[in-house]
Amino acid sequence: EAYRAEGIARRRSAVLFHFHPKLRETPLVQYYADMVCGLSNAGTLESIMLMNQALADASPDLYPRIKVPTLIIIGGDDFTKPGAYKLQSLVKGSEIVEMPGAGHANCFEQPWEYDRLAIAYLKRRGLFPG
């Protein structure tokens, strides 16, 4: 709804909101926000609204049907944390880990930690070579 009301101008604040508050003003995150916001074209606003709507309307009976190993990695300060724990409760056998000091964009903020967690998860299941 916010995009519908504010239009594409909302995009920059929404992009920055995905990052831990301490990182939002760093040159790297500002560069990333500039790059993402530079992708605006006629279909951008509509695709953002449709993606958000699809996430909001996801059928609850979908998640129990997931039968593959599932790892949910969230930042310790991720604004979606409550939803991530709800998702974990719906996907049987899924695991959730938090990355302290990271926000929603945890794989961008701490790629070394994200990779470490993902590789460890895959190795425990024999799904990572080496």
Image: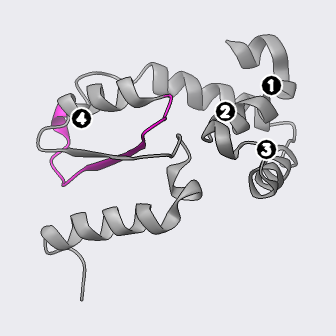
Q: Could you tell which of marks 1 and 3 lies nearer the N-terminus?
A: 1
- Marks 1/2: CA–CA distance: 11 Å
Q: What residue is pinned by disc 4?
A: 88
- Marks 3/2: CA–CA distance: 11 Å
Q: Residue 74: image x %, image y %?
A: 40, 43
Left or right: residue 8 compared with residue 74? right
Q: What residue is pinned by disc 3?
A: 25
Q: Amino acid at mark 1?
A: Arg
- Marks 4/3: CA–CA distance: 32 Å
Name the one closer to the observer, 96 or 100: 100
The span picked out in magenta is 64-79
Who's the residue at 51% across and 64% down the image? Answer: 111
Left or right: residue 63 compared with residue 29? left
Q: Which type of secondary structure does the marked residue at label 2 adopt?
A: helix
Q: Could you tell which of marks 1 and 4 lies nearer the N-terminus?
A: 1
Left or right: residue 25 compared with residue 68? right
Frontmost of labels 2 and 4 is: 2
Query: Residue 76 is drawn in which quadrant?
Result: top left
Q: Which type of secondary structure does the marked residue at label 3 adopt?
A: loop
Q: What residue is pinned by disc 2?
A: 17
Please rate how many residues cluster around mark 4, counting C-alpha atoms within 10 Å: few if below 14, some from 14 to 19, many from 20.
Answer: some
Q: Is residue 78 magenta?
A: yes
